[in-house]
Image (spheres, rainbow, N blue to C red):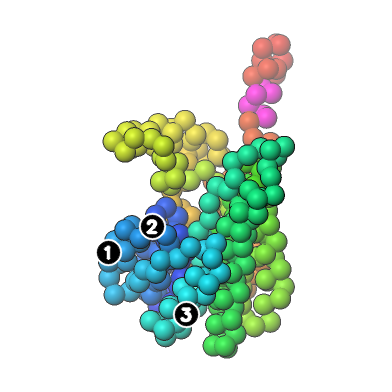
């Protein structure tokens, strides 16, 4: 359904690659202006140039509140207002296990994962309230925001906290016509999965990884950034005008079967013992 975002302006943090880039492209295809905020300057500028006059790139470290404020203010100056804030940029956080995770590592992780979501909400909401026409805030959480054990503790803790930010924002900002929702992507083939692999081997690696993981989600395949972007566009548009405070898994059904491979493994063991 094209043109759902005609006349709207959106910010996408982490918009130079992966889910952020796919969402920026989808926003423009739906008629919106887009401001990409990222620290990957070369990729960000290239993405904005490819999207044409409808897009702008602004260097933004989302762990720095002042830079998030500048991103929002630049969007308003350049395009005359703001309607959509997609808090997508994040990071893996400290990779230590729980017994080794120190205060400094946890603080840095939460500043990036949770603090960025708070900054995005605060500065976007400030503009939305001034404009008096509401707005939509979407924030990327994760399957790790719904369950434990899928990632390292700092990431799991941070992504759970992001959901708290979204739910509180829905309660506090709803009276201003501001909606706050979160997406929780499942296994999605983004460039970050190929980090650490030699550039010339990444395509083959990603193809092999996608095949190896395809049965880990009920859909029978891994997600692509465009799958997540479609849900983001819905939450950004007026089609979701009465949707607020929702935590939306976009994971091919993985969260609906939280026991994972329990049934498969149980059936195999029962067969080994002569059961059915």
Mark 1–mark 2 Cα distance, whole angstroms, equals: 15 Å
Residue that label 1 marks: 50
In magenta stretch: residue 264: yes
Horizontal placement of 231 versus 98: left or right? left
Q: Can residue 220 be seen in this view?
A: yes
Helix, strand or loop at mark 1: helix
Q: Principal SS element in the magenta part?
A: helix
Residue 158's place in the image compared with 261, above or below, is below
In the rendered image, residue 100, in percent from the top left (x then y), is placed at: 68, 38
Who comes first in sequence, dot 1 or dot 3?
1
Label 1 neighbourhood size at 10 Å, few (<14), some (14-19), many (20+)? few
Mark 1–mark 3 Cα distance, whole angstroms, equals: 23 Å
Residue located 59% across and 41% down the image: 95
Residue 142's place in the image compared with 211, above or below, is below
Total numbered circles: 3
Who comes first in sequence, dot 3 or dot 2?
2
In front: 94, or 264?
A: 94
Residue that label 3 marks: 73
Horizontal placement of 10 versus 247: left or right? left
Range shown magenta: 262-267
In the rendered image, residue 35, in percent from the top left (x then y), is placed at: 40, 71
Helix, strand or loop at mark 2: loop
Label 2 neighbourhood size at 10 Å, few (<14), some (14-19), many (20+)? some
Residue that label 2 marks: 40
**Residue 43: quarter of image:** bottom left
Horizontal placement of 263 versus 40: left or right? right
Residue located 43% across and 78% down the image: 74
């Amino acid at each position: 359904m094209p043109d759902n975002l005609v006349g709207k302006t959106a910010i996408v943090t982490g918009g130079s690659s992966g889910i952020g880039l796919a969402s920026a492209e989808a926003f423009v295809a739906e008629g919106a202006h887009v401001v990409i905020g990222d620290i990957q300057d070369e990729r960000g500028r290239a993405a904005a140039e490819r999207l044409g006059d409808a897009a702008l790139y602004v260097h933004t470290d989302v762990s720095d509140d002042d830079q998030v404020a500048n991103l929002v203010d630049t969007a308003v100056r350049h395009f005359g207002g703001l309607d959509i804030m997609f808090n997508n940029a994040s990071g893996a956080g400290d990779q230590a296990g729980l017994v080794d995770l120190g205060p400094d590592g946890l603080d840095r992780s939460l500043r990036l994962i949770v603090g960025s979501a708070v900054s995005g909400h605060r500065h976007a909401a400030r503009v939305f309230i001034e404009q008096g026409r509401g707005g939509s805030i979407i924030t990327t959480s994760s399957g790790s925001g719904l369950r434990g054990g899928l990632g390292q503790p700092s990431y799991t803790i941070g992504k759970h906290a992001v959901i708290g930010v979204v739910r509180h924002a829905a309660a506090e900002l709803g009276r201003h016509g501001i909606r706050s929702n979160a997406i929780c992507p499942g296994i999605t083939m983004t460039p970050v999965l190929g980090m650490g692999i030699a550039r010339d081997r990444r395509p083959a690696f990603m193809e092999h990884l996608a095949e190896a993981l395809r049965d880990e989600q009920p859909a029978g395949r891994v997600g692509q950034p465009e799958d997540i972007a479609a849900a983001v566009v819905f939450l950004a548009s007026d089609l979701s005008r009465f949707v607020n405070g929702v935590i939306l898994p976009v994971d091919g059904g993985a969260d609906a079967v939280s026991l994972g491979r329990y049934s498969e493994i149980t059936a195999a063991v029962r067969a080994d013992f002569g059961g059915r």
